[in-house]
Amino acid sequence: MLLPEEFVAFQAAAGGAGTGAEIVARYREVPRGPDPDIAQKAADAWCAWEAAAISGNPNDAAKGRWDDPVFRLRFMHVVTHYFAALGWVAMPLSGRAAEFGDLLGELLHSALDLSAPVATAWHLARFWSGARLQILPGGLHSAVDVVGHVRAASDRLLKRLQ
């Protein structure tokens, strides 16, 4: 809804429209196919979408590690595995969060993260009694963006453990 042109390009690289699960399944199968050029094009498209969604700016090109085509292919392989397994969906976890008991935890999540909606962390925090959720301003997503917040959360957790 927020990056429609980029999303259409993302869908097209996976063979067209479909549900999120269908698109992820198609991207997930590409690296297993016989044509490495098709796999690389799919990985490039996945990472272009990822870069736009993480930054919120479709003009932001992925930089640094994203420059490496091997990294892009491996990244697509890993994230499609997690998406297919619902690895970042809190609802399956929230049903088991009571098992965490009073285990202490600090959850950090950006309020406007387009790549991973804050609702996931919010639902988990509701069911995990030992967790504290800090919702960060803006749309920060990468560890580089939130390193200061991670340090502060680590300090808070250490105090809670003492």
Image (tube, rainbow, N blue to C red):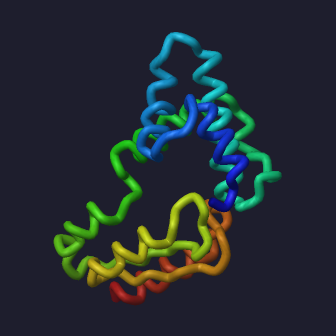
Looking at the picture, does residue 149 appear above or below residue 76?
below
Q: Residue furthest right?
A: 59
Q: 18 left or right of 97? A: right
Counting the numbered discs, the total is 0
Residue 121 lies in quadrant: bottom left
Q: Residue furthest top?
A: 34
Q: Residue at x 68, y 52 (%)?
A: 4
Q: 108 left or right of 54? A: left
The x, y position of residue 38, in whole percent, is: 61, 19
Quadrant position of the C terminus in the picture: bottom left
The x, y position of residue 117, in whole percent, is: 51, 66
Q: 123 left or right of 19? A: left
- Residue 28 visible to the viewer: yes
Looking at the picture, does residue 74 appear above or below residue 153?
above
The x, y position of residue 116, in whole percent, is: 52, 61
Looking at the picture, does residue 59 appear above or below residue 71?
below
Q: Residue at x 57, y 58 (%)?
A: 115
Quadrant position of the N terminus in the picture: bottom right
Q: Residue at x 53, y 81 (%)?
A: 135
The x, y position of residue 156, in whole percent, is: 46, 86
- Residue 78 visible to the viewer: no
Q: Residue at x 69, y 42 (%)?
A: 48
Looking at the picture, does residue 48 appear above or below residue 89?
above
Residue 146 lies in quadrant: bottom right
